[in-house]
Amino acid sequence: MKTIGLIGGMSWESTLLYYRLVNEEVRGRLGGLHSAKTLLYSVDFEPIERMQAAGRWDEAGEVLADAAERLERGGADLLVLCTNTMHRVASAIEPRVRIPFLHIADATAEAIRAAGLRKVGLLGTRFTMEQAFFRERLEQRFGVEVLVPPPEDRARVHAVIYEELCLGDVRAGSRAAFQSIVGALVAAGAEGIVLGCTEICMLLAQADVPVPVFDTTALHARAAVDRALAT
């Protein structure tokens, strides 16, 4: 079994989910008392969030590249960045390490294609919904069309993520709001919904959505275990 290097803390709420999911996946595949071999580097999210808000992406990329190097030196065999938004700086991380970097959008797109879908709605932070790094990877590399909510709905989704979910605050009213936003995306032609922020799975599950859900947290964790157990 290879050692999975996790760059987490963005937020630690979703990093907790990653740790549980990779261990459940390993136990489910190998049985007994097996668990995942992992190394975790968890950053302080407050300064990272300030860099996001100020558009200081190069500075944030340097912080995460340093974390990646530390994990590689510690013995990680592959690298998982436990956040959608910070894949905005994946290009700053990948050249700094020799070990494989598992991109969250790739794991998501492969699941969408396996389901035979061509058009999906995307929920995430405003950075993920509005900037190109996630949407264009799905569209250009995998041929998946991506729909995003209108500006007022993007603002609501972003606020719920940062002001509630990242703090472990899961509210029924926010779930209802997200379901309404999802309904509009489905009405616009979305065949599936991408939970494109690693905290959204705390709020929405498949039972809450009328079309297939693609939970990036679970898909990314599963892809990590696939790589860790590959011979």
Image: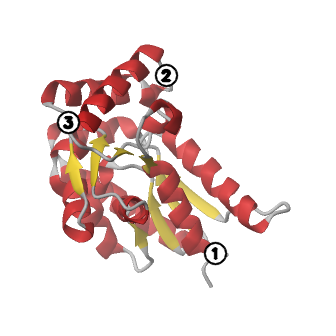
The quadrant of the picture occupied by the C terminus is: bottom right
Report crowding for label 1: few under 14, some 14 to 19, many 20 or more residues within 10 A (C-alpha): some
Q: Residue at x 53, y 65 (%)?
A: 224
Query: Tag 2 or tag 3, which sits nearer the N-term?
Result: 3
Q: Amino acid at mark 1?
A: Leu
Q: Secondary structure at mark 1?
A: helix
Which residue lies under the disc numbered 1? 229
Q: Is residue 138 above or below residue 175?
A: below
Q: Secondary structure at mark 2?
A: loop
230 vs 113, nearest the viewer = 113
Q: Which mark is residue 53?
A: 3
Which residue lies under the disc numbered 2? 170
53 vs 203, nearest the viewer = 203
Residue 206 position, x and y percent, is: 50, 38
Residue 92 falls in image quadrant: bottom left
Q: Residue at x 29, y 62 (%)?
A: 90
Q: Secondary structure at mark 3?
A: helix
Q: How many marks?
A: 3
The quadrant of the picture occupied by the N terminus is: bottom right
Residue 31 falls in image quadrant: bottom right
Alpha carbons under labels 3 and 2: distance apart? 23 Å
Q: Amino acid at mark 2?
A: Val
Q: Disc 1 or disc 3, which is closer to the eye?
A: 1
Q: Are marks 1 and 2 in contact (CB under 8 Å)?
A: no
Q: Amino acid at mark 3?
A: Ala
Q: Residue at x 38, y 62 (%)?
A: 116
